[in-house]
Amino acid sequence: MRDALRSIFSGKMARTPDKTPPHDDEMERAALGSMLFDADTVEAANQNHLKAEDFYSRAHQRIYEAILSLDTASERVRPDMQTVVQELRKEGKLDEAGGAAYVASLTSVIPSSANIEYYIRSVLDHSLRRSLLRVASEIGVEAYNESKEPFLILDEIQRILFELGDKRQAFKYESLSKVLGRTFDRIEEVYKTKVPLTGLSTGFDKLNEMTTGFQPSDFIVIGARPSVGKTALALNMASHIAFREQRSVGFFSLEMPDIALAQRLISSEAMVESKKMQNGFIKPEDFRNILRSVGVMSESRLFIVDEPNMRLRDLRSQARKLRSKEEVEIIFIDYLGLIGHENPMLPRHEQMSEISRNIKSLARELKIPIVVLCQLNREMERSGHSQPPTLANIRDSGSIEQDADLVMFLHRKPPEKDKGKKEGEEEQAQPMEGIPVELIIAKQRNGPVGHINLVMQSKYTKFREEEPQRPR
């Protein structure tokens, strides 16, 4: 394998040996013989998602199809030598299956039907090897197709390889009684431990309480108008998960350079004003806090992808790499409007619809939450600056709100004294610290909606939950 890869990267084509595709005829016959001898072993084949095309021999494919047909019939028939021969004869496929004598001979080749799992694994392993060879062949053909972008070919091959990796877990069904058993165990565990989180902690107690954490496979949207604090909130969440929960996190920065992003993280963690870090007017005590914070942060597993103008295919590829190589448990993307589409000629709303669907599909494929930041349109401002955003304010596409499992908005309310100011008057400057911001949960598939009061400490680019006012 290493020599073959070396020849590819050196520009030389590796010569594929002229061999029969991988298969083990003896293991195929043993698997079928076990099912004909003991019909209960068919259940093992179902649980392992064994399909007719996993057999190399056409005769074996036809025999297994007959076994499945009998096993899934409305009036279920236990497959054995006689019933399978009869089914094949009825379907007109007995000759393709090698004839009645060949079917009968299969029951004489099995040492023990107790080894059915071993036989099935062998059939599946050889089937996977043949699939890999087919993918390799397709790569060779597509590589000569100059009408198709090479990165599109690469993305499709990656998708096929991931599907092959999940092949044995492609589909299964269980009775409600089994699902209820596992569900009750989970309820009992939470009842005993009183752990309110079932997903990743966001770093905000009230948000955790309402969502029980960010859940695997969820597509999460955080929307706001520019300069309200989307990136700051996402970084606060990412840093909490990476630095305090010590989980692996991926952060795609399509707008801000990685150094600027790291500087924000340091400011937030060390509680040193970002402006002072930029102009160098830092006290010795602040510098010590920075050193201490950098030491903690450098031990974390936070991975930054700094790639402006990133296309959708590149994002998918990088996300898969981070998941497989670095085992990231959550991905943040800043922000949705900067993700490029492969077909720039499409109307923007169609591009965004496809990007949204792809991100939702990617979250399910990788089995991790993906948090995406997005801009809101100006409609909320036209009807009055103090108007809180709604799902209708998501820019470019209505499909984003349909695809998302959780949608949150940041809304900065104007100061009380500015609410009655007349048009044309200058807006009063907000304090550098303690700006009240609402985090609005506008949609949640599996939980309540509502709002959480936050306070933004601008000079540290840090959010904290608003402390309840004490009664006087």
Image: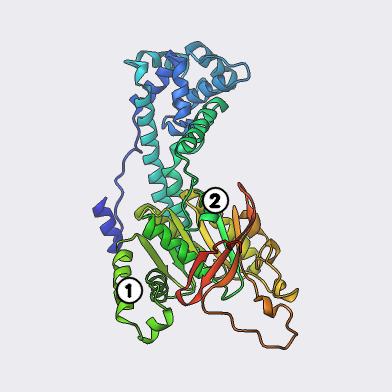
**Number of callouts in the render?**
2
To which quarter of the image does residue 294 belong?
bottom left
Give the percent coordinates (x, y) of residue 201: 46, 53
Give the residue at x 28% y 56%: 5
Read off the residue under disc 2: 209
Q: Nearer the viewer, residue 197 or 317?
A: 197
Q: Left or right: 224 with respect to 236? A: right
- Please tell me whether residue 200 is drawn above or below residue 190 in the rendered image: below
Q: Is residue 455 visible?
A: yes
Q: The residue under label 2 is which amino acid type?
A: Glu
- Viewer-proximal residue, 180 or 123? 180
Q: Residues within 10 Å of mark 1 (few under 14, many from 20)?
A: many
Q: Establish if 33 lies above or below 344.
A: above
Q: Residue at x 37, y 30 (%)?
A: 121
- For residue 233, above or below residue 444: below
Query: How many angstroms separate mark 2 from mark 1 (CA)?
Result: 32 Å
Q: Is residue 191 left or right of residue 408?
A: left
- According to the picture, the residue beneath numbered tag 1 turns out to be 290
| Residue 140 seen from this side | no
Q: Residue at x 52, y 53 (%)?
A: 208
Which of these two is toward me, 164 or 439? 439
Q: Position of residue 217 (x, y in %)?
A: 51, 49
